[in-house]
Image: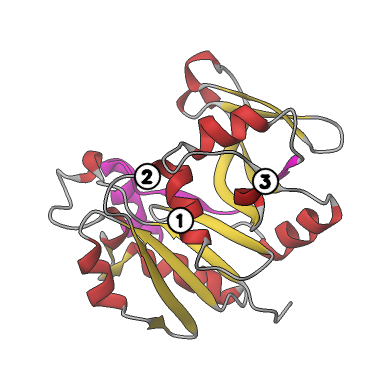
Amino acid sequence: MNKENKEAIILAGGFGTRLQSVVKELPKPMAPVNGRPFLTYILDYLIDYNYTKVVLSVGYLHEKIEDYFGSEYKSLKISYAVENEPLGTGGAIFYALSQCTSENVLILNGDTLFKADLDALQAFHGQHQSALSIILRQVPDTSRYGSVQTDENQRIISFTEKNNSIGAGMINGGIYLINNNLAQQLPLPQKFSFEKDLMEKYVHTMPFYGIASDGYFIDIGIPEDYARAQKEL
């Protein structure tokens, strides 16, 4: 495995509205799963792939995350990009990218654990000279998520919104490897949606690629799946 300086950003600033019935007074990634915060499972997954630094993009109740983790977790250095006002997913990612020095940076969601092969993603990203590589997941019904279409070279050619998406297909698994200089290349505002204003808008003009994975996947954003996490993790 590659021992270079590997950096990741975890989006951990959500309100967790749908989880409020079972997890109160905590940001969603801090929801306890078998006695420890869900976020620790994601950090352990990154350690398995020799990541050395994580920037936590935080907002709502960020003090609870900072008080728990401080500036390190096991072998990972941790820093924080604190949003004083919501910047949207894209604004949050680009704000956190300013704390990263690696050429390519991994992006993950703080409420989802998707155990894809991150070494394969890194190799794929370099091989395709991709500006943004996305881990995709095959599901029997894309209507809850929206779908992603790729060509024979695995280049992403379109995104279909969930309202218009039916049947089996590939969905965005929420793990990205992004070129650190993408922020300089695109004329984006301070607040923007990563999905709408970047991915969907530039899919035809920028080299975006998708690699499929059938790794273990759980999203604790709704109470039923949060309950499932207690059994499976």
* Label disc, if present, on residue 185 of the rendered structure: 3
| Location of residue 89 (image quadrant) | top left
**Residue located at (40% from left, 81% from top):** 73
- Residue 92, relative to residue 80: is it above or below? above
- The residue to which callout 1 is attached is 95
- Seen from this angle, which residue lies furthest bottom? 75
Secondary element at image label 3: helix
Tell which circle, 2 or 1, labels the residue nearer the N-terminal end.
Answer: 2
In which quadrant of the rendered image does the N terminus lie?
bottom right
Tell whether 44 sits left or right of 139: left
* Label disc, if present, on residue 87 of the rendered structure: 2
Q: Is residue 150 magenta?
A: no
| Location of residue 203 (image quadrant) | top right
Real-space Cα separation, disc 3 to disc 2, in angstroms: 19 Å
| Location of residue 127 (image quadrant) | bottom right
In which quadrant of the rendered image does the C terminus lie?
bottom left
Tell whether 229 sits left or right of 119: left
- The image position of residue 141, as x and y in percent, is 54, 25
Real-space Cα separation, disc 2 to disc 1, in angstroms: 9 Å
**Residue located at (22% from left, 40% from top):** 17
Discs 3/1, front: 3
- The image position of residue 225, as x and y in percent, is 34, 45
Q: What is the magenta range?
A: 208-233
Characterize the local packing of mark 3: few (<14), some (14-19) or many (20 or more) Cα atoms within 10 angstroms.
few
Q: Are marks 2 and 1 in contact (CB under 8 Å)?
A: yes
Tell which circle, 3 or 1, labels the residue nearer the N-terminal end.
Answer: 1
- The image position of residue 53, as x and y in percent, is 52, 75
